[in-house]
Image: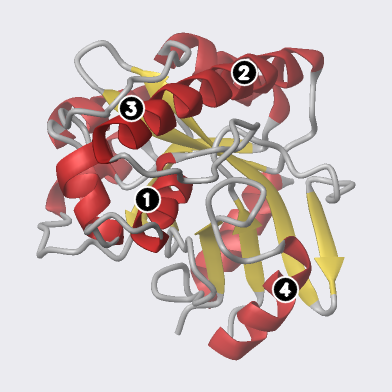
Amino acid sequence: MVVADLHVHTTRSDGTLTLDAVPDAARSAGVEVVAVTDHDRLQPALDGPVTERDGITLVHGIELRVDAGSQRVDLLGYGVVPTPALTTLVEEIQLNRAERGRAIVECVEDRLGVSLGVEPRPGLGRPHIARAIAESPAEYDYQGAFDHLIGDDCPCYVARDIPSFERGREVLAETCGVVGLAHPLRYDDPVAALELTADLDTVERYYPYDHDVDPEPVERAIETHDLLATGGSDAHDEVLGRAGLDRAGTDGFLAALG
């Protein structure tokens, strides 16, 4: 039974769930603890690293994409207490996100001859653009937009400027209770990604991959580097609890946050 879902997105980035709706979604899934981990954005409505709202424990988190040299990976910071360094970093990222979003939207509109009605703004991500494409007269659904237009290596893809792994880890370590690696088996080179956990506190052990995976490399990293195992659904919709921690894992995680 999933007690804690530690990877949830809201409308603050590219999720469809509002922060106010998180408690109800958690209760519907039987989840007691939720980490709100929006992409490269903080949650100003959460006034502490761990708060309670409508009987649900909410952990202020963040998912931060960083450049690890050979590939880009995502770090999860939990128990955020904002610092000037983190605020500056996310502001830089959001400015680039808006500029990148504008470039992608203009490319799609020029290529398809449609108007998407998407304005560049902080928090704008490719899922927003894919949804707009699916709702436009263009003959692409949401997944088709990624597969043929805006996915990596597609004609309208534009890379984002992101911080280095070292900078991201350092900034998160100063502001979060624990910092870990998200979905390690999703990357092109999972072995290289897992090597990064030598400098982290946690790794996302439980995750709803869309294909069969061998968790043994993750288990080995946990043992080698004495990592805390975390887990979450990476929810961008309103369904929580597809993956996460059981009662014992949840208790250990909350204790580690201090």
Front of the two marks 3 and 1: 3
Callout 4 environment at 10 Å: few (<14), some (14 to 19), or many (20+)? few
N-terminal-most mark, 4 or 1 = 4
Mark 2 or mark 4, earlier in chain: 4
* Callout in the foreground (2, 4): 2
- The CA span between labels 3 and 1 is 13 Å
Viewer-nearest residue: 10 or 241:
10
Residue in the foreground of this view, choosing between 37 and 229: 37
Circle 4 sits on which residue?
21
**Could you give the CA–CA distance between mark 4 and mark 1, rounded to whole angstroms?**
23 Å
Q: Nearer the viewer, residue 122 or 105?
A: 105
- Up/down of 75 relative to 2, above or below: above
Task: Tell me whether the residue at label 4 lies in contact with that at label 1, contact meaning CB atoms closer than 8 angstroms.
Answer: no
Q: Are marks 3 and 1 in contact (CB under 8 Å)?
A: no
Could you tell me the amino acid type at mark 4?
A: Ala
Distance between mark 4 and mark 3 Cα atoms: 34 Å
Q: What residue is drawn where x is 32% and y is 35%?
A: 108
State which tag comes first along the sequence, 1 or 2.
2
N-term-proximal mark, 3 vs 2: 2
Looking at the image, the residue that sits furthest to the right is 47
Task: Using the rendered view, name the quadrant where residue 253 is placed.
Answer: bottom right
**Amino acid identity at mark 1:** Ala
**Residue that carries the numbered disc 1 in the rendered image:** 130
Asked if the residue at tag 4 contacts the one at tag 2, i.e. Cβ–Cβ closer than 8 Å, the answer is no
Name the secondary structure under disc 4: helix
Q: Residues within 10 Å of mark 1 (few under 14, many from 20)?
A: many
Circle 3 residue: 107
Q: Residue at x 60, y 36 (%)?
A: 119
Which color scheme does this rendered protein use? secondary structure
Dot 2 amino acid type: Leu
Residue 57: % across, % down:
75, 67
* C-beta proximity under 8 Å, tags 3 and 2: no
